[in-house]
Each structure stands twice: as structure tokens, then as C-alpha cells.
Image (spheres, rainbow, N blue to C red):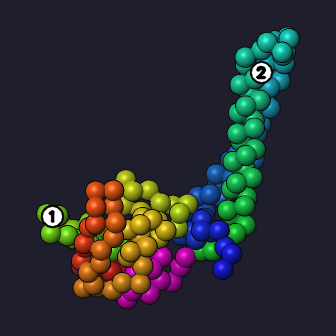
Amino acid sequence: MNEPHDSFLTKEKYEELKKELSHLKTVRRKEVAESLEYARSLGDISENAEYQEARDMQAAIEERIQYLEQVIKEAKIVANIKKGDAVGLGSIVSIKNDKDKEPRVYSIVGSEEANIHDHKLSYLSPLGEALMGKTKGDSFTFETPGGKQTYTILKVE
């Protein structure tokens, strides 16, 4: 399987990336082109900081457009997840260890969507990999910077 690991997206994230791509191609490209025109009008571009800044912004936008086009082209939409069985992409998992007062709840997502602050865990992260395929009631151990941690799965949705 030679798919890039960032190719799994929820429908919502896919639509969000398409919207961002459209905005970059229409609005942002035009804004940067106007900035470049203005900076050129100021005279000597060899020592013009505004011109250089606009060029850098243009390069960054074009790089992001290429990246988004690639992600969107290769995206596999995660949908129709079987609820309650084994942990997989799209699952919502509640886990707890002896030290936790409250269970921890994570959504298992592709790398592109991972955001620990939003409790979105990449299936390729150490914890995500340890969770994959497990079911309610399973205990598992995984390595953290602070040593091995053992958790029990309380719920899989």
C-alpha cells in the first residue's frame, strides 16, 4: 500500500481543504498580485522590502496550493464507520489508566486532521497505533517519553 498516510480525511476536513484551496486560488492570489504591483510602483525592486515580502508571500501561497491540490487528489474519505466495534479511522474512543480521574476521549483521524488540543489523534501516532484494532474492555501498553503507559478502553463509538 503506497498511499501517503495523510490521505485519510473526514468529509468535513475534505470540504474545509477544498474551500481553503478555492480561497487561495481566487482571493489570495489576487491580493498578492496587487501587493506586487504596488511594491513595483515604489521604484527600485532590488532594495524594496515590500516587494520581497510580497514575493515571499506569493511563493508560500503557491506552495500551499500545490500541497492542498495533492492532498485533495489523493484523499480517501472516511465515512460509514462501523460504530462500536474495533477502533479504526473515525472512531471515538474513551480510555483510562489508573492515574486518570476522568477518561480521556479521542477521535481517531488521519494525519492531516490530527490536533491533540481538539482531541483528534492521528492513527499513526504512538497512542493511535496502539489503539487501532482494539475493542471495548481491552487493555494496552504503549511507550511515552515518560515511560510505558497502560490504558483500558472504556468505549468505542
- Residue 91 colored in magenta in the image: no
Q: Position of residue 104 (x, y in %)?
A: 26, 66
Q: Position of residue 106 (x, y in %)?
A: 35, 67
Location of the N terminus by quadrant is bottom right
Q: Position of residue 109 (x, y in %)?
A: 48, 68
Of residues 150 and 87, the one drawn nearer to the viewer in this rendering: 150
Total numbered labels placed on residues in the image: 2
At label 1, the amino acid type is Lys
Task: Name the side, left or right, on which 129 lies relative to 151.
Answer: right
- Residue 80 colored in magenta in the image: yes
The range drawn in magenta is 78-90
Q: Secondary structure at mark 1?
A: loop
Tell me which label, 2 or 1, sits earlier in the chain. 2
**Overall secondary structure of the magenta stretch?**
loop
| Disc marking residue 99 | 1
Q: Residue at x 49, y 68 (%)?
A: 124
At label 2, the amino acid type is Tyr
Res 83 visible: no
**Disc 2 target residue:** 51
Q: Residue at x 37, y 88 (%)?
A: 85
Q: Residue at x 60, y 65 (%)?
A: 6
Q: Secondary structure at mark 2?
A: helix
Location of the C terminus by quadrant is bottom left
For the residues labelled 2 and 1, the Cα–Cα distance comes to 55 Å
Residue 145: name its quadrant. bottom left
Pointer 1: residues within 10 angstroms few (<14), some, or many (20+)? few
Q: Residue at x 63, y 74 (%)?
A: 76
